[in-house]
Structure formats: C-alpha cells, structure tokens
Image: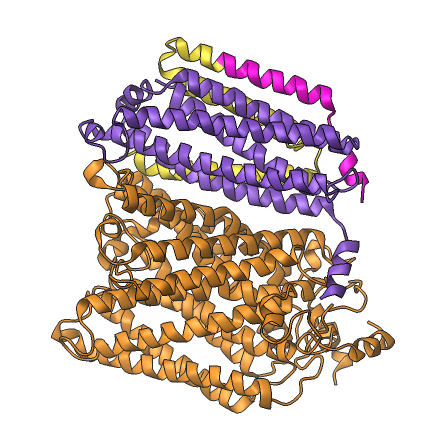
Chain colours: A orange, B purple, C yellow
C-alpha cells in the first residue's frame, strides 16, 4: 500500500464514528457493516458469558461444603443446564466465528464486506431471538430446563420444566450459525483480493473456512433432533419414547452427530488465532504453513466422524465402539501437527512477550492437557471407568475453556487495537492473565483427580472424602472468575482510556494491519493486491538485516 | 450505509449468490437426512411391521402428488427459461402454475391426512396404540416427515409468490434473475426430498 | 457478469423431455412396486429415486452446466450424509 493511498484513508471517518442511516443504537442494530455486526455479537456474547460465569461460581459455592449450601438439588440441576446452554450455544459456538470471523474475515482477505451483508445482520437478529427464547424459559411457570445441555430423552420428554423454549432457542441459534457459515464460505470463495491464492490466505481464514463447513453440514442434524424432541413433547409421535418403541440411543447418536463436530466449531477458529499470533510475536515465518492449513480441514472432516465416543456406555455394538474409538484417536494427529508447528515457529524466534502471546502460551499447554485426556477418554477401557465423572467435565473444560476460551481472550487482546483504535492497558491484563491461568489449572486439574477417584458429574453434593479436593477446586474457580472479571473490566476501561493505537501495533503482516485502527467503513480505499504469503518475516531471519 | 450499498450493487456476482443458495440447500438436505437416518434405523429394527403399515397408505394419492410436484418443478424451470428470453408474461404464468400445483399438492395431502385421522390413525390415538411398536413408529415418521415436507412446500409457495411480485415489478428481469433461480433451486430441492419420501412410504411393502 | 448465466440454460425442449422422463420413471417405480421383488424392493425403489434426482439436479438445477465447484460441494454434502448413515449403522447393524 502506497503512502498517498494511506493519507486518503486517514481522512475518512472510521466505522465507529462514520455517519449512519439511523441514529444511536439503531445505527448499530440495523447496520449491515460486518465490523459493527461483530461488535454487536461481542457485546451480547460477553453479557451471556458473564452470566454463565456467575452461575458456575455459584455451583462451586454450593459444592464448597457438604449438604445444601445455597441451593436445593432441583435448582442446581437447572443451574448446570443453564450454564451449559449459555456457554455452548450463546458463547463459545458463536464466539469466534461471529465476532472475530465477522470482523477480521473481510479485512484479512482484502474485501469491503462479507458476501451477503444483510444476511449477516439477519444472523445476529436470529442470534438475539434465540437467546431471548432461552431467557424466556427462566420466567415461565415450571422454571428453566433441568435436563443438562444435552436434553437426553426420555427425561427431556417427561420433565415438567420448560424444555420447549430451550429447544426452540437452540434451534434458532443453530439457524443463525448456519447462515454465518454460509456467508463466510461464499465470501472466502468469491471475495479474496487479487493475488490472494488459497495458500496465501492467513491461517485464521483456513480455520474459519473449515469451521464454516462444519457449521453448514452438522448444525441441521441438531435442528431436526431438537425439533423431534419438541414434536415428541407436543404430540407424542413415539420416535424417541421407549414406551412406544422409540430408541433413546438413536437420540444420542443424532445429538452427538452435531454436538461433537460443534466442539470443532469452537476449537478450530481458536487454533487459527494461535496460528496468527505466534508468527507475529515470534517474528518468524510460520513453520509448516500448508500442514497447518490442511490440518484444519483434516480436523473438521475426521472430527465429524467420531460422535459416538460420547456413548461408549449406552450399549452400542462392539463393532461400533471399536470404530468410533479408532476414529477418535485419528483426530489427535492433525491436532498434534498444529502444536508441533507452533513450537517449531517459536523455536529461535525473536520472541516479544505481550498479553496476546501469554494467553496463547497458556492455551497451548491447556489444549495439550485437554487433548491428551481426550485420548484417554477415547480408549474404551478408561472411558468406561470415568464416564459421567468429573474427569469428563475437566477434560472438556480444558479443551473448551483452557483451549478455545483462552484463545478467544488472546484474540480479544490481539485485535482489540484494530477493533477499537485503542491499546489495552497492559498491567491489569497481565495480572488478569496470571489469575486466570493459575485459577483455571487449580480448578480443573483438581477435577481430573476428583473424577478419577469417582466423583460423578452433575451432583449438587459430595461424599465427605471428596470435600477437601472440592474446596481446592472451588477456590480455584474463584481465582479464575476474579481473573475473568479483571480482564473484561480492563477491556471496557481500555475502550475509553487506552492509549491511541497505531495502525500496526504488533508488527503483523496480514492485511488487517494495513488499514487504519479502527478501520474506515469500507475497509480498503482500494482493494489491495497480494504478492507475498501472510507471514513474511524474512527481514528478521536474515542475519545481515539484524536491527 | 448508502455508500456501502452502492458498492455491493456495482459488484454483482450471480455465481456467488448461487453458491450461497446451494450451501443453504445442503443444510436442508442434511436436515431431512437426519429424518431419513431415523427412518432407516427403525425400518431396519422393525422390518416386517414397516411393510404392514406401509400397505395402509394410498398409492394412488401418493403417485398423483408425485406427478403434481414433478410437473411443478418443470414449470418453475420453464419460467426461468422464459424470463431469460425476456418473455415476462409467459414466465409469470408458468410461475403461477407452479404455485397452483403446489396448492393442489397440499389439498391432496390434507385429504390424505384427514382420511387417516378419520380412521383413528394419528399420534397417541387409541387405535394406533393397539398396534405393535414398529407400526406406531412408522406412522409417527409418516406424519413427521410428510408434515415437515408440507411445511417446506408452504414456504416454497411463499418464496415463489414473492418472485412473482418481483417479476411483475421488473425487479426480476431478463438481465437479472438470480433471485428467481434461487427460488427455483429451493423448489427443486423440495421436489427431490419428495422423490425419496414417495417410494419409502408409499411403495415399499 | 452476464456470461455467467448464459451457460445455465438447456432450453424449453430439453426441460420438457426431462419432465416426461421423470413422469415415466414414476410410472416405472409404481409398476415395479406391484411386483414382488423380495429383498430387492428397497434397492430398486431407491435406485430409481436416485436416477430421478440426478435428472433434477443436473438439468433442472443446472448442476451439469455450473462451475465444477458446485459439483464438488454437492459431492461433499452427499458424502457427509452417507457417512452419517454408515457410521450409525456400525452400531445398529452389529447390535
């Protein structure tokens, strides 16, 4: 990009201040600008995230001492259901693609917007509608669903709590997710800047692309499954009701046919973010670009074939168990390829320690622990011992929060200057990171031990011998929550008080760093031409160019 | 805003729009695919009971509806061919014919369902509950799958109705008809789903 | 941009022929249902349904004349669904 083009762009108002058709809030909720839509998602998502964090903390308070501490068993059941539904459907599934995918995808591929801008806004409206439908279930007589986020039949067709609003909410949220995926695939195929061939795309875009395919091909299965449970509750057609010959195990097959790939909707963009941040902060060209790109596709495809490893204790056929166990082990290969390549990139790099990289480093370690325990769970013999214990809960929190969640915070700190035009205040962010990492591991690693000793999940009480470990976990959860609140508060304060961000504060090489922070409404004054790959740090790697 | 809108108009990309539509069709395919998996599993588990229950459906009405839907698919594709040649009136008549045929399909479906309900076969009916599990599941699936398909027919009618208005107002015209193509694609998918539903429910016994 | 649409048109005649073919295949599948084919009943019915949908996909939905990308996408979707079927039956078929 030439200097004169830059000067022309700086004169344009940025997307946060540009005049809009409607005033105030309406200028946001009716805006088809992908950047504004991303901010809308960010705001709604963070709100729900904090609610679910509070629910989690309350559950840990309940488990701090024996017997009833603050809530009765029924309320506890409703709390973990709500915690799960919010965290899964309202936070971590839409999180990465809808916030950072929306904001960064057009910027990173050199486009002015996504392919279907109005559909993009419609997706957010659906997201809001789905979220409100879930919220409504809290206030109807009967109270929120107590089934767990998995809605297993036959309990979900018998319980008197408000299962239908929760199902309908998840259905609408799924539809929103599908439309986002559809939009992204079309955008990536049709709107890349001239010269940006597939292997010159940033790795985050590869991750978003694979994720979008999972969103499109897996989400409809949960749609039809939740619809069937709704119809079952309303009319009693018998499809999942064992009293009429229905097969509850078939429900579990269909449920996990989506919900396991959904795990990859959560983790793939997170892995993409790590692949973005590491080369920038190591000042090195990414090691094994093609391997990382292909491994995203491989994780998305093999990951869609492993769903029944959630069901090893329901009485599947031995052949089925064997096949699904084998396929589960296969997913480890592309995941490990990514980790090896990241480490190889860091090796001999000129590493710049800053908040985004700290979150990424925690993420890599925690993702590895989550991944290895995933292999343990994929082994049939171990699985039967620890099914439905805290071991499983700890495993998926290590992957979902230790992996995807920490990567989300890394992305937040990495792209914040671009999104808001301000730098994040570094000191509180570092303290927040430290609290989160210490609290997280103290909390969930203890849960691995508890689970291995036999503590079942979803119990509001525990046997006396588990109490000391429960107390360690609870204290860990409070440290974690304190870290989260500190980090989030710091983000909010930095929006107003942070130092003005330059165009490229971290020295990134991808296209989003070639536009002003925050970007103008149309992103690029003129569509850039791409010549080199996305992480060209060759000037740092040549010994004679050392500065 | 208006500036961004102007940009997207100058950048017309019909092929991209069709990619988006096809991706949406895949989600519909998988949505029904989930139901077909349920059907396959229960047919496998209750093979004979499915055959007995299947014999109770009216092959004539099923065949008639198949012919209606296939014809409606033909009229919609002819309507696109007509607008491509600038024949607005012909295109509108063919599209109207599609909507009328869809309506006939639903009328037949209505009579078929009411006939079954009159014979006491509907979810949780005492008559149905006396039957073995496989037959309960068969009729549960029958109502669910044909019902979901009928819902798609209704949505398709609404979409094609909008297309009719768009042609009348020249929003869809000889130079720009990707909207009509997208509506047509949706309608053909609804047809394909029925192409599979028809033998699985009406013919195999 | 217009040239992108010019390819996607088979003409009134071909559409009508395909429509007549579809009606014919419907007649065939109904006729075959009257004969007791034993365990081939499901297979024949599904093969005919498959042929019919190939016609609709290729001619009515223009998959044949679209860019290769459309056919790759369709294959990905259909194969995914097929794999869902096969893996589910790894449980049920060996139960």
Q: Is residue A140 visible?
A: yes
Horizontal side of residue A212 vs A86, given as left or right: right
Residue A424 is at least partly visible in this image:
no
Above or below for A201 versus C85: below
Q: Quadrant of residue C18?
A: top right
At x 27%, y 35%, the residue is: B123
Q: Nearer the viewer, residue A217 or A155?
A: A155
Q: Please, which residue is most extreme toward the right here?
A: A4
Q: Quadrant of the N terminus of chain A?
A: bottom right
Choose between A112 and B112: the one closer to the eye. Answer: B112
| Quarter placement of the C terminus of chain A | bottom right
Residue A155 image position (x, y, % from top left) = 23, 51
Residue C27 forms part of the magenta stretch: yes
In this image, A524 relative to A427: left or right?
right
Q: Residue at x 59, y 55 (%)?
A: A209
Q: Position of residue A528 (x, y in %)?
A: 79, 65
The segment highlighted magenta reads C1-28
Q: Residue at x 40, y 9 (%)?
A: C34
Q: Relative to residue A319, is residue A145 depicted above or below?
A: below
Q: Nearer the viewer, residue A430 or B78?
A: B78
């Amino acid at each position: 990009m030439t200097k004169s083009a830059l000067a022309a762009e700086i004169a344009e108002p940025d997307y946060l201040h540009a005049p809009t058709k409607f005033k105030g809030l309406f200028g946001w909720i009716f805006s088809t600008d992908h950047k504004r839509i991303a901010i809308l998602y960010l705001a709604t998502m963070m709100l729900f995230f904090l609610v679910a964090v509070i629910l989690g903390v309350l559950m840990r308070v309940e488990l701090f001492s024996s017997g009833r501490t603050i809530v009765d068993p029924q309320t506890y059941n409703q709390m973990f259901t709500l915690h799960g539904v919010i965290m899964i459907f309202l936070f971590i599934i839409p999180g990465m693609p809808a916030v950072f995918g929306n904001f960064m995808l057009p910027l990173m591929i050199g486009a002015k917007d996504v392919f279907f801008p109005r559909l993009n806004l419609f997706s957010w409206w659906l997201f809001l509608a789905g979220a409100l439908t879930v919220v409504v279930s809290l206030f109807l007589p009967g109270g929120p669903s107590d089934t767990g986020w998995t809605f297993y039949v036959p309990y979900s067709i018998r319980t008197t709590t408000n299962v239908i609003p929760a199902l309908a909410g998840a259905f609408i949220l799924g539809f929103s997710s599908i439309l986002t995926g559809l939009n992204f695939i079309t955008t990536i195929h049709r709107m890349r800047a001239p010269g940006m061939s597939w292997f010159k795309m940033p790795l985050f875009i590869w991750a978003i692309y694979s994720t979008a395919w999972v969103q499109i091909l897996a989400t409809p299965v949960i749609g039809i499954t939740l619809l069937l449970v709704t119809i079952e509750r309303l009319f009693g057609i018998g499809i999942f009701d064992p009293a009429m010959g229905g097969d509850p195990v078939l429900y579990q097959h269909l449920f996990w046919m989506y919900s396991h790939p959904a795990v990859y909707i959560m983790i793939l963009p997170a892995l993409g973010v790590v692949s973005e941040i590491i080369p920038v902060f190591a000042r090195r060209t990414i090691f094994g670009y093609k391997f990382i790109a292909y491994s995203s596709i491989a994780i998305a495809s093999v990951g869609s074939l492993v769903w029944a490893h959630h069901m090893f204790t329901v009485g599947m056929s031995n052949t089925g168990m064997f096949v699904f166990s084998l396929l589960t082990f296969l997913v480890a290969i592309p995941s490990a390829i990514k980790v090896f390549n990241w480490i190889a990139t860091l090796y001999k790099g000129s590493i710049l320690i800053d908040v985004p990289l700290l979150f990424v480093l925690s993420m890599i370690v925690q993702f590895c622990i989550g991944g290895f325990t995933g292999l343990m769970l994929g082994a049939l013999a171990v699985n039967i011992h620890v099914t439905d214990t805290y071991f499983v809960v700890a495993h998926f929190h290590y992957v979902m929060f230790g992996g995807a969640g920490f990567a989300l915070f890394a992305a937040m700190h990495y792209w914040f200057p671009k999104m808001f035009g301000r730098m994040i205040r570094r000191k509180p962010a570092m303290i927040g990171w430290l609290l989160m990492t210490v609290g997280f591991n103290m909390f969930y690693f203890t849960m691995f031990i508890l689970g291995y000793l036999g503590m079942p999940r979803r119990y509001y009480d525990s046997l006396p011998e588990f109490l000391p470990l429960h107390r360690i976990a609870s204290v860990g959860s409070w440290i974690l929550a304190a870290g989260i609140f500190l980090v989030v508060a710091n983000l909010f304060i930095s929006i107003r008080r942070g130092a003005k961000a330059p165009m490229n504060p971290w020295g990134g090489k991808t296209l989003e760093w070639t536009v002003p922070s925050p970007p103008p409404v149309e992103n690029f004054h003129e569509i850039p031409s791409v010549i080199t790959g996305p992480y060209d740090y060759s000037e740092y790697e040549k010994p004679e160019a050392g500065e | 805003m208006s500036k961004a809108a102007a940009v997207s108009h100058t950048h017309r990309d019909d092929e991209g729009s069709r990619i988006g539509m096809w991706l949406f069709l895949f989600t519909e395919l998988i949505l029904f695919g989930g139901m077909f998996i349920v059907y396959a599993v229960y047919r496998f588990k209750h093979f004979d009971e499915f055959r007995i229950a299947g014999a109770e459906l009216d092959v004539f009405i099923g065949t008639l509806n198949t012919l209606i839907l296939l014809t409606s698919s033909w009229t919609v594709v002819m309507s696109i061919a007509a607008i491509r040649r600038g024949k607005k009136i012909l295109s509108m008549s063919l599209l109207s014919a599609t909507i009328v045929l869809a309506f006939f399909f639903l009328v037949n479906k209505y009579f078929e369902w009411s006939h079954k309900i009159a014979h006491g076969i509907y979810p949780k009916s005492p008559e149905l509950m006396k039957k073995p599990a496989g037959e309960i599941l068969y009729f549960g699936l029958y109502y669910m799958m044909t019902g979901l398909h009928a819902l798609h027919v209704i949505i398709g009618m609404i979409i094609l109705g909008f297309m009719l208005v768009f042609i009348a107002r020249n929003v869809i015209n000889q130079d720009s008809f990707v909207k009509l193509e997208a509506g047509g694609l949706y309608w053909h998918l609804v047809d394909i789903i029925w192409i599979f539903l028809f033998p699985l429910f009406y013919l195999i016994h | 941009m217009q040239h992108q649409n010019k390819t996607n048109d088979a003409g009134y005649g071909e559409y009508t022929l395909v429509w007549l073919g579809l009606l014919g295949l419907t007649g065939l599948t109904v006729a075959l249902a009257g004969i007791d084919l034993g365990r081939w009943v499901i297979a024949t019915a599904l093969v005919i349904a498959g042929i019919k949908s190939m016609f609709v996909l290729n001619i009515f939905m223009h998959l044949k004349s679209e860019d290769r990308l459309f056919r790759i996408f369709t294959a990905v979707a259909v194969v995914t669904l097929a794999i869902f079927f096969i893996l589910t039956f790894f449980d049920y078929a060996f139960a």
